[in-house]
Image (cartoon, rainbow, N blue to C red):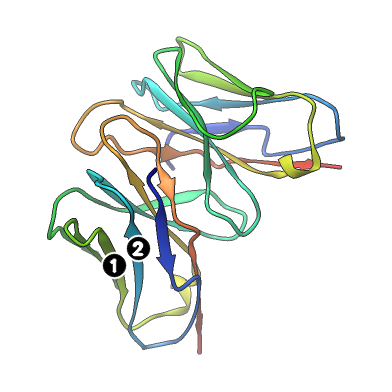
Amino acid sequence: ETGVTQSPTHLIKTRGQQVTLRCSSQSGHNTVSWYQQALGQGPQFIFQYYREEENGRGNFPPRFSGLQFPNYSSELNVNALELDDSALYLCASNPGTGVYNEQFFGPGTRLTVL
Amino acid sequence: ELKVEQNPLFLSMQEGKNYTIYCNYSTTSDRLYWYRQDPGKSLESLFVLLSNGAVKQEGRLMASLDTKARLSTLHITAAVHDLSATYFCAVTNSGNTPLVFGKGTRLSVIA
């Protein structure tokens, strides 16, 4: 157990809908990152938040957006869902500083878009 | 742009045999991570390697890092079925930057 939780575990949506995925980071971790993992692929970086501000973004369109809250929780919002958005969505939290600054991953949310 | 390549992508091993997974990365990095992923599950951290020549071992797995060659290896000794999983290496540029992952090596250990 990493102390990082995500909800929901599974989700089924239809094309064009909107979805919100949630993550609760480890206490004290001020950085959260979101990754998309398509079937059979490595995780791809979506964006990172540090102290409630977006701190970096991968090659994802603006319909992927996020928020980080002071209580170590965060959200990933996806608008206008497309079939290719079907994937495992992982959040990871890390302290932001320190020698290892290791990212600890949550269990993921499996999103299926029909 | 930081890129990470792993090979092989698929590996079928007999129980009791040894094998090595390779991870190459394209630009200078200050941290390299190895993760394990079981089907349908999240990523489990195995090793964090920071410096040139770093070697870490846990059970039948040993990871090493050569920063000059931009190469890390994950060596499997006397494989057992429980090691069947997908193994990812991931690298960061520096500081609090995101991870760049390889495509993963799907390991299957057979009797």
In the image shown, does B60 or B13 lie closer to the viewer? Answer: B13
Q: Chain of mark 2?
A: B
Q: Quadrant of residue A108?
A: top right
The image position of residue B45, as x and y in percent, is 37, 50
The image position of residue A36, as x and y in percent, is 59, 41
Tell me, for residue A52, which label it has, or none. none
Q: Amino acid at mark 1?
A: Thr
Residue B4's place in the image compared with A13, above or below, is below
Q: Amino acid at mark 2?
A: Cys
Q: CA distance from mark 1 to mark 2?
A: 6 Å
Q: Residue at x 59, y 21 (%)?
A: A75
The image position of residue B30, as x and y in percent, is 22, 43
Q: Label 2: how many residues lie within 10 Å, few (<14), some (14-19) or many (20+)?
A: many
Q: Chain of mark 1?
A: B
Q: Which residue in the structure is indicated by mark 2?
A: B23
Q: Residue at x 31, y 39 (%)?
A: A102
> Answer yes or no: do the residues labelled 1 and 2 have beta carbons within 8 Å?
yes
Q: Which residue in the structure is indicated by mark 1?
A: B73
Label 1: element kind: strand
Q: Quadrant of the C terminus of chain A?
A: top right
Q: Quadrant of the N terminus of chain A?
A: top left
Q: Are marks 1 and 2 on the same chain?
A: yes
Q: Residue at x 26, y 62 (%)?
A: B71
